[in-house]
Amino acid sequence: MGQALDVHRLQFAFTVTFHYIFPQLTMGLALLLVYLKTKALRTGDEHYNRAARFWARIFGINFALGVVTGIPMEFQFGTNWAAFSKAAGGVIGQTLAMEGVFSFFLESSFLGLFLFGEKRLGRIGHWVAAFLVFLGSWLSGYLIVATDAWMQRPTGYRIGAHGEIELSSFWQLLLNKWALWQYAHNMLGAVQTGCFVMAGVGAFYLLTQRHENYGRTFVRAGVLVGAAAAILQLFPTGDMQGKLVAYNQQPTLAAMEGLFESQEGAPLAILGQPDVEKRKLDNPLEVPNMLSFLTYRQWRANIKGLADFPQTEWPDQIVLLYYSYHVMVGLGTIFIAVMVLAALLHWRGKLYESRWMLWMLMVCVPLPYIANTAGWMTAELGRQPWLIYGLMRTASGISPRVAAGNAWFTLIGFMGMYTILAILWLFLIYREIELGPEQGNRPTGEDAVVLAAD
């Protein structure tokens, strides 16, 4: 059972990590598309419409791959996690069904109109389509986060006569305090992905002296929105998310900080290597009393260490959890520095000529993907050894009749298929960037036939 559990966890971790490459960009770009269409509507400048068309094509590629990689995850609830689905399906089925029926169809329907119906819809109708794509993608994100938040902090449920978990309050499920702050924190991460990608592409155009007008638009939008998102992700959303962990999952907080012994005035670990066997943090670089202050707003507050809890309650991957958390926080700090500095250069009128900053924006494009992945790893590793915190252990949720060998077989298959999809994704995105925003000026359909005849 132990080996099968590890493979089931590895398979779901791989598929969900690969899948989230795409939604984090579409959710971030959805907001930026509304910004570009709003500028086009207010100014009447076709430049912004062309910019929006360019990013809509990149959005469409990511949306399609997000759909393809998202479907296997839903099936895994039945194939790999049947015991979990049987016990908690009456609760998580509510939000997952709403995500599929309402938000997904809202987003996909209006994405089609946005991509192919601009002439029919008119300027205002096309803006409405962009806004509804944004609304659908962000609503989809909330329903997924609400599902995960219930697993982190179960609310609005009761235990049925046969031990199954039943929904007792739909609104407690939907308005779980954990969900509200996790959603805000998560969506700001998605916005940062969109901003860094947009600014990075704009920087590439400026550095190569191609499509420079669009390059300036992309850099400006990415930097200004990204600077605000980076700051808000640290405070208040990151701060409140940390407090929720401290109040609801105390062993998780201790593992994230590498804190093995309880301390009054606990330090905040900046660097260090956790040694689980010796129960200590090696070579620590710490800020004295800061963890106590950030958690309870008291410099000498007591923070419980892992030793205060039974070892059966500890997260089972303490080292990986510790590093995931610190990678997320470290990159978040870098994002603030880069985006705020770029915003200051823009304010001083020197951003577009600062080649070193343009290079930095371009090089930073992969980093939000790493940070978002590390953030989700922190959340999911931190919940262990629970599948539903305090209610169901992860080991109790797997499909009992699916052997480790079967799970390995499907995992290897997913790896092969997703490698092909990754190559296709990179090729399609590269092609769109090479063609550039001016591609949107090329006539299509009936107009192309008329011009060809002329």
Image (cartoon, grey):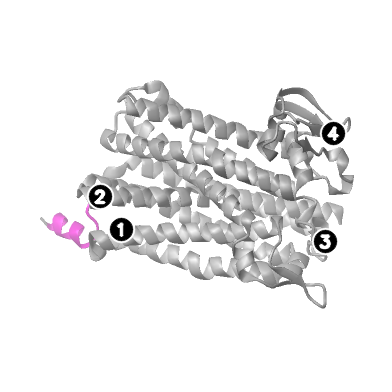
Q: What whole-number distance in Å separates the C-alpha atoms at marks 2 and 1?
A: 9 Å
Q: Residue drawn at (78%, 64%), measured in percent from left and top?
A: 399
Q: Residues within 10 Å of mark 4 (few under 14, many from 20)?
A: some
Please, what secondary structure does the residue beneath circle 4 have?
A: loop
Q: Residues within 10 Å of mark 2 (few under 14, many from 20)?
A: many
Q: Amino acid at mark 2?
A: Ala
Residues tagged 2 and 1 counted as in contact (Cβ below 8 A):
yes
> In the image, which is nearer the foreground, mark 4 or mark 1?
4
> In the image, which is nearer the foreground, mark 2 or mark 4?
4
Of the image marks 3 and 2, the number of the one nearer the N terminus:
2
Q: Amino acid at mark 3?
A: Ser
| Chain part drawn in magenta | 441-453
Q: Amino acid at mark 1?
A: Trp
Which residue is identified by label 4? 261
Q: Which mark is residue 127?
A: 1
> In the image, which is nearer the foreground, mark 3 or mark 2?
2
Q: Position of residue 39 (x, y in %)?
A: 27, 48
